[in-house]
Amino acid sequence: MITATTQNDQQLINEFQGGNTRSFEMLLNRHKDKIFTSIVMMVRDRSLADDIFQDVFIKVIDTIKAGQYNEEGKFLPWVLRIAHNQCIDHFRKVKKNPSLSVGDHGEMFESSLFTNDNAETSIIKLQRASDIQGLLNKLPEDQREVIVMRHFANLSFKEIAEKTDCSINTALGRMRYALINLRRLIAEVPAAVA
């Protein structure tokens, strides 16, 4: 019998289509951190990211169950594209349906009047987040992990060291090399995050 660690994404998808729900759970566990991190980077709100993450996987499950998945060998990029589109859809809904809030004296305020971002700015920010995600994906895993934990999860270097089972100096070194590599990557493609 083939174990989950040796099965590729397509094999797990085929098993899930055949009724093995455990296969989808293994597939989700394999990719959930990357997908969730990319959503957090786009929306900058962990609770909103949780909601969008769930919506993404409902869409993924529905598509696979309906037999409409045909991105053989490209499961993760396909899901990341769905996540990106779900984030854009969220910002469009917020723009179309601005929320109203009631002040202390019963007056109504439209929250969109107090934000500086319009739909175009939000989409530009999403594209930049996507570009940054692309640059981060080019870093070695240990460097990318430190960047994400520090800048997107707001962990201290002590917390990063504990979570990655290394010394604080090692975590600091990984951050230093990650920043050096990011600067080099940005210099190679200056329009990527400009």
Image (cartoon, rainbow, N blue to C red):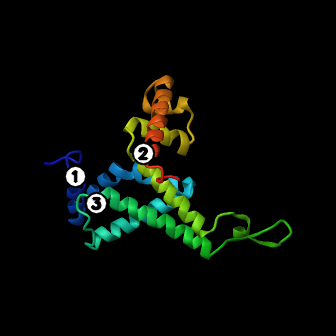
Q: Please tell me which of labels 2 and 1 falls first in the chain.
A: 1
Give above or below for 164 relative to 111: above
x then y, percent, for residue 146: 47, 36
Image point 61% across, 72% down: which residue?
Answer: 95
**Residue ID for mark 1:** 8
Label 1 sits on what residue type? Asn
x then y, percent, for residue 170: 46, 25
Q: Is residue 13 left or right of residue 121?
A: left
Q: Please tell me which of labels 2 and 3 falls first in the chain.
A: 3
Label placed on residue 188: 2
**What secondary structure is found at the residue carrying circle 2?**
helix
The residues tagged by marks 3 and 1 sit, at their Cα atoms, a distance apart of: 16 Å
Image point 49% across, 33% down: which residue?
Answer: 175
Image point 40% across, 66% down: which residue?
Answer: 58
In contact (CB < 8 Å): disc 2 and disc 1: no
* Residue farthest along the left direction in this orientation: 1
The residues tagged by marks 2 and 1 sit, at their Cα atoms, a distance apart of: 33 Å
